[in-house]
Amino acid sequence: MKLRLCLLLGLLAGSLQAQDPDWVRDWDAAQRQRPEHLTSKSRIAPKSEPGDVMVVRGHVFKADGSTPAEGAIVFAYHTDAKGLYNQKGKPGWRLRGWAVTDKSGAYEFTTIRPAPYPSGTVPAHIHLTVEGGGLPRQWTEEFRFADDPRLSKSDIEHSQKEGKFGNVRSVRRDGDTQHVEFDIRSKRVADF
């Protein structure tokens, strides 16, 4: 029993130390700007933001993968249509938003489809973190788009093994709007 506890504490300490301190600083700064009142539907990119409109929706589940997590705050951020997180010389993430899950664990963001980094080698993606609603503070695996030519075979295979919680998601088009669904299974312990 003591050995298991020591191993668990060691793993937890290692994951906390492995987090990039600049990222944690930016995350903390963003959370200080979180709106006081949240709903399950939110907007990340303003209507005037250049790019293809995208609606991201999904559910947050507790660690068992089937119990909805009501009241969890989902924080999302991503690059703009040029593949940039912010304007030159300004830290943090310009395109970001928060939603709080409803009774079914559902959340939804209206935004634009992010572009890959200017280097063009990393697939486009959206980052999310989750906290509250009885869940530990955690980052989720960034999710990517199945139609992105930058995806590797191993990205796709890894996601397929995870099933509905995989991080490569199909993109459905409805007129000029792209739709993506991304469900999140909570971790049992905080990871930052």
Image (cartoon, grey):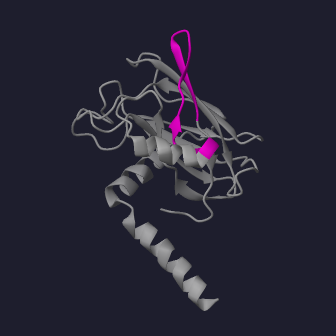
**On screen, 105 above or below 6?**
above
Name the residue at 73% across, 46% down: 70
Q: Is residue 104 left or right of residue 34?
A: right
Q: Position of residue 105 (x, y in %)?
A: 71, 42
Q: Is residue 165 left or right of residue 112?
A: right
- Residue situated in front as seen by the camera: 148 or 1: 148
- The quarter of the displayed image where residue 48 is located: top left
Q: Is residue 7 in view? A: yes
Q: Position of residue 153 (x, y in %)?
A: 41, 41
**On screen, 5 above or below 105?**
below
Q: Is residue 33 in view? A: no
**On screen, 39 above or below 138?**
above
- Residue situated in front as seen by the camera: 66 or 189: 66
Q: Is residue 12 left or right of residue 93?
A: right
Give the magenta-colored segment's residue range: 163-181
Q: Is residue 110 shown in magenta?
A: no
Name the residue at 39% across, 69% down: 17
- Residue situated in front as seen by the camera: 59 or 47: 59
Pick out the residue farthest to the bottom.
Answer: 2
**On screen, 37 above or below 46?**
below
- The quarter of the displayed image where residue 22 is located: bottom left
Position of the N terminus, as image quadrant, is bottom right
Q: Position of residue 154 (x, y in %)?
A: 42, 46
Q: Position of residue 68 (x, y in %)?
A: 74, 47
